[in-house]
Image (cartoon, rainbow, N blue to C red):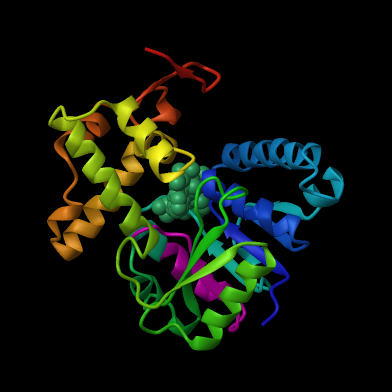
Amino acid sequence: MTIEKVFIVGSGLMGGGIAQVCAQAGMSAILNDENKAATEKALNTIAWSVGKLIEKGKLKEDKATVLGRIQIASGFERASDADLVVEAVFENLDVKKQIFKNLDAVCKPDTILASNTSAIPITELGVITGHPERVVGIHFFNPVPMMRAVEVVKGICTSEAVMNSAVEFVRKIGKSPIRVESDIPGFILNRINLVSYVEAIRLLERGIGTVSDIDTGVRMAFGRPMGPFETGDMVGLDVSYGGLTAIYAESHDPGFLPPQLLKRKVKAGQLGRKTGKGWYQYDNDGNKVEG
Ligand SMILES: NC(=O)c1ccc[n+]([C@@H]2O[C@H](COP(=O)([O-])OP(=O)(O)OC[C@H]3O[C@@H](n4cnc5c(N)ncnc54)[C@H](O)[C@@H]3O)[C@@H](O)[C@H]2O)c1
């Protein structure tokens, strides 16, 4: 199936970015959120980001053309003729289940229903609907306009045709699809990333290295653009903590047991860039405060 019209539920950090990359690829994108302020904020962020990409010569079209492909919808009615719906609301199973149930009732039978979840099994969302074969994971990375990998995740019931259409969609938006053949929590890339994050926190807890030295070392030795603590602050300590908790709950693999220090910082509201303090401290413009 060729995807031309995409409906996005949830216009936060991820949903806004997903709408942007769809519009940049010439698709029509409809943004939905239960909170009107979130869609307005998403539109402003998209306008800023598209402007930056044009300035850097990375986008050939003019801003008005790209932004003209994005619309706002308050309910789910306009999902009825979408080719693809991407759900990107809070990481909460009950909230997501209700959304899939509602979408199943309004969408045409061949609309692909995707979730951007980082850890919830796709199968659990699929079985809520009358057509679990059309439910798939399309897992983007943050920030969506910059990160090129996108995991395409198969639930037990997801059909091969739906997997192939999702892979084709990811290519159409200029990203690299990574097929994940089973919906284990954390999929492939977060499992790899989180193990090194947990190890970095444990080394810090034991006083073996400092936040700044560990980040510098990882950047310099492995050619990564950011160290584990810098990445942790960008993603949100609560998001990583939630991911680790979900993987540990299902696997009981001690490698994914959330470290005490991470748990304490989440409880203290030190969630990273979004709260101005995480592993580092940030000023009101989001710049790292040294020392
Ligand atoms: N933040 C990341 O780095 C990241 C990376 C990959 C995947 N994810 C996943 O993407 C999803 C969204 O994460 P986010 O960081 O964009 O969250 P966010 O908090 O920035 O945005 C979530 C949005 O969903 C909206 N929402 C909540 N319930 C809704 C409903 N019933 N109907 C419509 N809108 C509703 C909220 O108002 C909010 O604007 C989560 O499943 C998360 O695990 C996040």
Image point (53%, 59%), residue name: 149
Instruction: Tell which of 128 and 146 is nearer to you.
Output: 146
x%, y% of residue 169?
63, 71
> 198 or 209: nearer the eye?
209
Position of 114 with respect to 216 (left or right) is right
237 with respect to 13 (left or right) = left
Pick the residue in front: 108 or 171.
171
Q: Position of residue 84 (x, y in %)?
A: 61, 71
Give how far across and how far down residue 20 sits, in percent: 68, 51
One can see residue 263 in this view: no
Q: Residue furthest top?
A: 291
* Residue 236 vertical position relative to residue 86 in the rendered view, above or below: above
Which stretch did the figure color magenta?
A: 98-119
- Is residue 14 found left or right of 195 in the rendered image? right
Q: State whether residue 103 is above or below residue 291.
A: below
In this rendering, position of residue 96 left or right of residue 50: left
User: Looking at the picture, how far across and down is residue 194, in whole percent?
Assistant: 30, 50
| Residue at the spot 66% in from the left edge and 71% down from the top edge | 82
Q: From the image, which quarter does the N terminus lie in?
A: bottom right
Residue 55 drawn in magenta: no
Q: Residue at left 42%, top 41%? A: 235
Comparing 141 with 202, the one in front is: 202
User: What's the residue at 53%, 43% (across, down)?
Assistant: 13
Q: Quadrant of the C terminus?
A: top left
Do we see residue 1 in this rendering? yes
Seen in the picture, residue 20 relative to 275 is either above or below; the reply is below
